[in-house]
Amino acid sequence: MIRKFSPVFILFIIIISGSSLFASDGTTAILQAEHQLPEPLMVIPFIVLLLMIATGPLFYKHFWEHHYPKIAMGLGLITVLYYLIFLNDTHSLLHTLAEYLSFIALLSSLFVASGGILIKVNKKATPLLNVLFLAFGAVISNVIGTTGASMLLIRPFIKINKSRIKPYHVIFFIFIISNIGGALTPIGDPPLFLGFLRGVPFFWVIQNVWYIWIPTMILVLAVFYVMDSLNKGNSESETGKSFSGKIEFKGLKNLLYLGIIILSVFLDPAVLSFVPSLAPLPFGIREIIMFSVVYLSYKNADQEVLRANEFDFEPIKEVAYLFVGIFATMIPALQLIANEANVLGDKLNAGVFYWATGMLSGFLDNAPTYLNFLSAAMGKYGLDVNIKSHVQEFVNHDEIYLQAISVAAVFFGALTYIGNGPNFMVKSICERAGINMPSFFTYIIKYSIIILIPIFAIIWYIFFLGKG
Amino acid sequence: MNTIDESIKNNSPCLYYGNRLILPFHAHFLKVIIEDDILTDFSSSSKGINIKEEDDFTSLYFLDFEDLKNSVSKYESIKLIVVDKGKNIFDIDNHRKVAVYLEEKHKARIEETDEDILFIE
């Protein structure tokens, strides 16, 4: 029923919108100016969805597994109907639909293309090798995105450690490769790409974030190294085993597809003026290319590689359903937060921007969170996030706010399974391999609060406390 | 009655109907993975799986699934860690890691997992 409903629902949104309603450069900030703010009570569907994502697999797994698509779509529908009927606001819905399509196009294309590549590493697992692997993955995530790097590297990482794998291996993989690593370029993580589209120069991120990224990486990797050194696991059983030290790749043609995805990221009318806009459609040339890559890379993939990777669409299907609910239900939450941030903008310093952007990015989608706080920070100087020259002026004026927002939006995505798209997919792949992953709450309590929050607090203390 | 190794070597066919998987051997089950469900409770009160041993085969009923074919896709498998009945369960060398691939017409194929397949004991 849901599968039938979904396209009808999307079509409905498009039809009722009319051709002039979807502005490709529309933003939440503009929309708020034009439309009434939602009732605070309308954040309830979002809270309910978050709570169910957290508790479903834990307390009512069977029910959740069967009904999560209907629940996510149903809660999303409540918000959609509220915006249509009570606020008469189709702009916000269309804008969110466009962001969702962009999000799922990138994630699904990277998921399928990387699913056709097999990397075999025949080396003995040691804490040092793992640290080097994670550091390599962190760097690579700036080239192929955190999603691409996660999908490509999670299997070899598990295989290297198969005799001693513990949940913390996967959690640190999520921390480093699926999130923190991708803070250096706009390709790394969606919020930075959104900033790039708005006018933040491509190399601004690496020039201004590298000296925050390096100590963060060192701290997280150091904690991992200590924990991994204490894990003896079954490594004794590998003592007599010989390792060739070889690294083998299969399905290399899919690297071409990955390259196409990365290049297509730039095919946006806001970046390259010759790229045609498909407005009023809620997608562009970029999304068409990405969805084509999904089809072609799957159709032409090496069957042996797909079998070895146990390729299945279920993890991306799960992300697609849950995030359709998350994207829809979080519209009121983001608009209310953006409004508060704009009202209080003058009183907020870099530290507040860091923590507020970060904590919300851990539970909301980090891309719109980044944009809303960027808008609020620019409001301090009377600048508009929708005007490219204003963004560039803001970047040159005072980098501390953009640094705080950029770093927090990416780093804090590691706080929960829902903080960033690849987190959930990595979890699902590991469970299919037989690794018992921690629950939503255990992840937060045992890992995020104990390991990440203290490290993020150190970063705040050194770089942002009392500044701005 | 086939052993696990004989079943693999002879390509002995397995069957599936709805949520029931029929294996051509008797075994002690240590771990079963289907989708992202990791099953280790094989007691009679288990909520995830029910194992019934018949004269010449073993039936596995996956209680959280209505139809295995709808859940296990072409490149996926149901993974099992099993020990032949009569063999020492405490000897790790006797633990067999096998993957069951669902095919057409209710047939399933059993294979010992190779190094490529991610399968953590």
Image (cartoon, coloured by chain):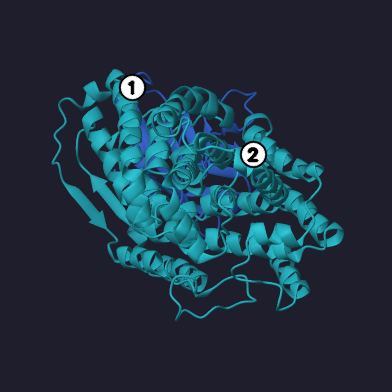
Chain colours: A cyan, B blue
Asked whether B21 or A124 is in front, the reply is A124
Tell me, yes or no, whether the two marked residues, 2 and 1, touch with CB atoms within 8 Å: no
Residue A156 coordinates in the image, percent (x, y): 31, 44
Tag shown at residue A53: 2
The residue sitting at 58% across, 28% down in the picture is A441
A307 relative to A430, above or below: below
Give percent across and percent down for residue A150.
39, 47
> Residue most toward the right?
A86
> Which chain's residue wears label 1?
A
| Disc 2: host chain | A
The N terminus of chain B appears in which quarter of the rendering?
top left
Residue position for label 1: A227
Q: Is residue B94 above or below residue A7?
A: above
Image quadrant in which the C terminus of chain B is located: top left
**Residue A28: x percent and y percent?**
65, 57
- Relative horizontal placement of residue A90, taking residue A432 as reference (left or right): right
